[in-house]
Amino acid sequence: MTQSPNTLPPESGPLAGRTVAVVHAAWHSCGSYQVNVAQAQAYRAMGAHVISLALREWPPGALDEQAPHWRDYIAKTQDMPAHERFYSNMPRGAFADPRFWAKVYWPLIHGDHARATAAMTALAPIPPGLAGRRIDLIHCNHFFCMPAARNLSADAPLIVETQDIQANQYDLRNKGAFVAPPRATYAQMLDYELDTLRKADLLVHLNAEECAQFEQLLPEKRHALVYPAAPAAPTGPGGRDIVIVASGNHPNTLGVEWFLQEVAPLARGVDVKIAGNVDAALKQRNPQLYARCAGMFLGRVADIGAVYANAGLVLLPTTEGHGLSIKAVEALSSGAPLIATSQAFRGMNMPIAAIGNLLVADDPATFAAALRAAALQIGEDPRALGPARAVSDTRRYYEDHFSAAAYRRALQALAVPMARA
């Protein structure tokens, strides 16, 4: 097997001979999944034997890896580099367990997703191949996976990567949804999240804003800011395509909706392609808008790198969201010229004014004007908007802060002293 430049032989790494479990939600095709992949890569590069434990929150179902939901997940996550992969979810028999009705169903119908999702992972049994295994360090993603992490090992050192204040996402989910009274409040969900996080040995945060918030909320805990590693997009050859890349999560859907409703009418005649499964999400949310703009959507693309490689300009019309945007990091890594809202770079502490191939526009008129001007330049010469991508300002910023090498250095300084000898 050919090793990547960031992979060390196991015998030479500082975690050689030790086992690290990466515990995470069974999500794919999203920024969080890419973070999980980077964690496994980093620990392998440190010489550890890496175990992945993927947790499906809902609904209860078969625990067999051949079940349709696990076959689909496994098929879409073939790049997960753990040495061993395990999967779990609430079993079908959960409905006969009184804990399900008290700890999952009751909170869920009242909109208390914090309690419900944590209870879901608590009820997910540890796979037989993992039971009783010695674990020297657990790297757990999201507070709601902590119960499963502790079921895996009650005493292994526990790093929890927060990936945003989840109460923000839950509160957003409850808006406009039917919730049985008494309705769970943001404060209630946040309190439960914080109480759970107090049980971690170290809290790692993905962006500067999130780190500052958690330091204020949990001053008694140890915190660290570690920007996530994101796979680098190709840096060329470039072309005339103007693209938006977006998965179908709620903030991305809102951003694409804003672009199509507010910006695109002011930039008529400019051909923009939208790649990713945001098409299905927008079709469900706003079918009339989707119908008017259906020709702009490419849908889920097997090789998203080719979209970046052939783009002359990448747009980031981000209007909502909490936590660092992996999609924005991906765009930075391509080295392509960017037009973006400032919201796209939340939590990065990035010196935006010093980035030469980036233009920030926060209102529709400014965004549309920049887009029209850039489209004219691309039409005349696809290389007119910036320097060679491999040495562009955005690519250099990616290398310094979000590359696999930068992530491994930061994580190694924290993890190695914590792992059991």
Image: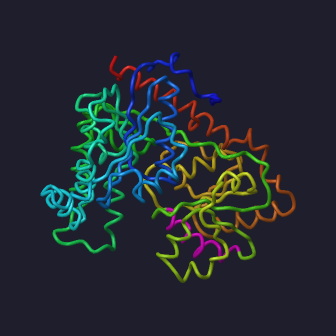
Rendered residue at 71%/53% (across/down): 306
Image coords of residue 378 (percent x, y): 81, 60
Left or right? Give the position of 169 relative to 120. Answer: right
Image coords of residue 257 (percent x, y): 54, 71
Image coords of residue 289 (percent x, y): 56, 80
In the rendered view of the protein, which quadrant contains the N terminus?
top right
Image coords of residue 394 (percent x, y): 66, 44
Rendered residue at 67%/51% (across/down): 305
Left or right? Give the position of 310 relative to 163. Answer: right
Left or right? Give the position of 330 relative to 168. Answer: right
Find the residue positioned furthest to the right: 380
Q: Between 213 and 122, which is closer to the camera in this rendering? A: 122
| Residue 261 drawn in magenta | yes
Region in magenta: 252-267
Give the dominant element type of the magenta stretch: helix, strand or loop: helix
Q: Between 78 and 287, which is closer to the camera in this rendering? A: 78
Rendered residue at 79%/45% (across/down): 387
Rendered residue at 65%/67% (across/down): 298
In the rendered view of the protein, which quadrant contains the C terminus?
top left
Report how many numbered discs are placed on residues in the image: 0
- From the viewer's perspective, is residue 47 above or below residue 283? above
- From the viewer's perspective, is residue 385 above or below residue 202? below
- From the viewer's perspective, is residue 144 above or below residue 367? above
Q: Is residue 256 visible?
A: yes
| Residue 288 drawn in magenta | no
Colouring style: rainbow
Q: Is residue 346 visible?
A: no
Q: In the figure, residue 377 lies in which quadrant?
A: bottom right
Left or right? Give the position of 42 relative to 393. Answer: left
Q: Between 17 and 220, which is closer to the camera in this rendering? A: 17
Q: In the figure, residue 102 lies in which quadrant?
A: bottom left
